Image: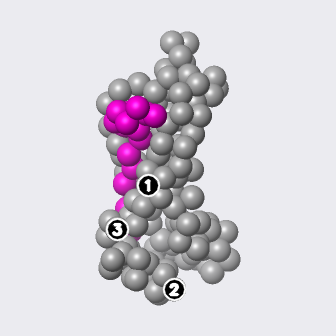
Amino acid sequence: MVSHEINIRILYKHTDQMGVVHHSNYIVFFEEARTELMRSIGITYADVERRGTMMPILDVNVKYIQPALYDEIISVRASIDTMPMARMVFAYEVRGADGRMIATGSTTLGFIDAATRRPQRVPAWLVEILEPILDK
């Protein structure tokens, strides 16, 4: 498993009239954490695309447990537990500064050839990067 954690301060724009984070923002928080996880292992989405691969979102799941509130600092941990084949699954945990679980979720991304837009398996170069990390 490989994981990376980021902190996010809840801004007014993230909340609804009650000062609670709007449910749609969790998907944005997941994207931020996923992007930084990939960056932490030496990959950016720009690198992936320069190498001729795109990674569209195929599925998103969120379980809301407790609300996050305006001006709160939350942590979002993204992790990869298994080697991707045709799909890459990221898991997420969102916690408050006090450690309480706010939400959990996952995203499943596919791999497509950027030129043909046809599905493909995980690129060999990505497997080479992930193998030593996921085998720990």
Closer to us: 124 or 101: 101
Picture layout, residue 18 above or below residue 121: above
- Measured as percent of width and height from the top left, residue 47 is found at 65, 74
User: Do we see residue 19 in this rendering?
Assistant: yes
- Measured as percent of width and height from the top left, residue 78 is found at 44, 55
Q: Which of the two discs, 1 and 3, labels the residue nearer the N terminus? A: 3
Q: Are marks 1 and 3 in contact (CB under 8 Å)?
A: no
Q: Is residue 89 magenta?
A: yes
Q: Residues within 10 Å of mark 2 (few under 14, many from 20)?
A: few
Q: Secondary structure at mark 2?
A: helix
Q: Which residue in the rendered view is the most extreme toward the front?
A: 98
Q: Which of the two discs, 3 and 2, labels the residue nearer the N terminus? A: 3
Q: What residue would you read off at disc 2?
A: 125
**Residue at x 46% of width, y 27% of height:** 68
Kind of residue indicated by mark 1? Ala
In this image, 64 relative to 22: left or right? left
Picture layout, residue 91 above or below residue 100: below
Q: What residue would you read off at disc 3?
A: 1
Q: Nearer the viewer, mark 3 or mark 2?
A: 3
Q: What residue would you read off at disc 1?
A: 78
Q: Which residues are magenta?
A: 87-103
Q: Which of the two discs, 2 and 1, labels the residue nearer the N terminus? A: 1
Q: Residues within 10 Å of mark 1 (few under 14, many from 20)?
A: many
In this image, 30 relative to 46: left or right? left
Kind of residue indicated by mark 2? Trp
